[in-house]
Image (tube, rainbow, N blue to C red):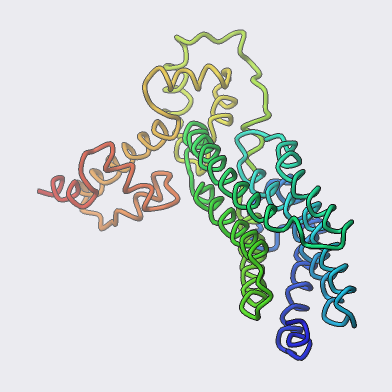
Amino acid sequence: MYEQIREDTLFIILYSGVTFMAMMASCYLLLRRANAIAPDVTPPLRLRRWTGAFFASIALSHAWYMPILFLPTSEDIKLCDLTGGLLDSLTYFPLAIAVVFAMLQDRRRPLWPIAVMMAPIIAGNAWNLATRSYALLPMLYGYYLLMCVGLILYMIRASRQYGRWLRDNFSDLEHKEVWQSFVVLAAVLLMFAIYALANESRTYVYAMLVVCTVLIGYLLWRVETLSDLSDAVSRKARTSSRTIAGNIGPLLKQHCEEQQLYLQYDISLDQLATLIGINRSYLSKHFASQGITYNAYINGLRVQHFVKLYREAVATHQPVTAQQLAFQSGFRNYNTFSAAFKRMMGMNTTEWMMTVKS
């Protein structure tokens, strides 16, 4: 198989290109502070660093395997391959899992479980290298499968928690979509599967290059367009001692509703608590006692603002569109507005607008 690839100029060019792409993406994330992809977004520094390290591991892994194409004997090829497997289990795989964990910003998840998961794979690859054989590969492949299943189950649970946290703390959920974490997870697991089920065919090596290229491009875009939400996690309450739960309703009316703070894009629960001068945890408990989330509260005010604007437009015979008024009411995304409007009004926007005109 390697003899065939040595003669495949296209493969060598693509392989070198992916290596260079990963190296440049790593240097960009680790060394450049400015955001060239989305200048108005401040991405999470922790995620940026882990992703940069992951890209570096891809580049180093590719660079390590490159000599296989030129080694003269099968023993040299085996030694290079076994050593690469051990290095991948120490760098490439754990860093990929760390990136997936870091994409969920509701809390800083411990990374020691990654070391526990990877320990059997590291030990198995070390044994294979020491004995210069592939004897433990079947067992390692089986363990890969179990690890992937475990990661999927964990991410389903963690992502549900993350989704609830987003709804409780942020008025806008655009560019924070939980499902995108699963896209990255799926790509990582696909690379794991290709790696584990390698059959040394041309299809395998080209599939690996394609998946790797897509993952680098998508993950780079995702990291740079994901806003840093760490303030909502780490910022401490400032004025809790002088606030009681009974005052929260009037404070919200005075500072949020009357001053129309809900019209600000992406205002978080933590920011609102600071602006009206109350304890963040008290504010969160207040919404919970009302049977709503923070997201539902803010979007409810925005829908009411939309209703007011539209009634005024109809009364004065001004030509307006629902999309135009939705943006004026604080919504960044029209689909988000439509869903919030239907939940609150019990009908879609078009039906309601027709009832107002009639």
Residue at left offset 42%, top offset 17%? 249
Residue found at x 36% / y 22%: 291
Left or right side of 306 for 27: right
The answer to whether residue 242 is above or below residue 197 is: above
Q: Position of residue 294 (x, y in %)?
A: 45, 30
In front of the other: 343 or 325: 343
Q: Position of residue 7 (x, y in %)?
A: 76, 91
Tally of numbered tags:
0
Which quadrant holds the N terminus? bottom right
Q: Provide residue 38's location: percent of width, then percent of height.
A: 63, 59
Identify whether 156 is placed above or below 165. below
Depth order, front residue of 211/221: 211
Instruction: Tell me which residue sits at (28%, 39%) in the image.
Output: 343
Q: Nearer the viewer, residue 137 or 196?
A: 137
On the question of residue 261 being in view, the answer is: no
**Left or right: where 300 falls relative to 232:** left
Quarter holding residue 15: bottom right
Image location of residue 156, percent across then percent down: 51, 42
Q: Would residue 58 be seen by someone viewing this image from the given angle? A: yes
**Is 130 drawn above or below residue 61 in the view shown?**
above
In this rendering, position of residue 9 left or right of residue 68: left
The picture quadrant where one finds residue 14 is: bottom right
Residue at left 36%, top 49%? 326
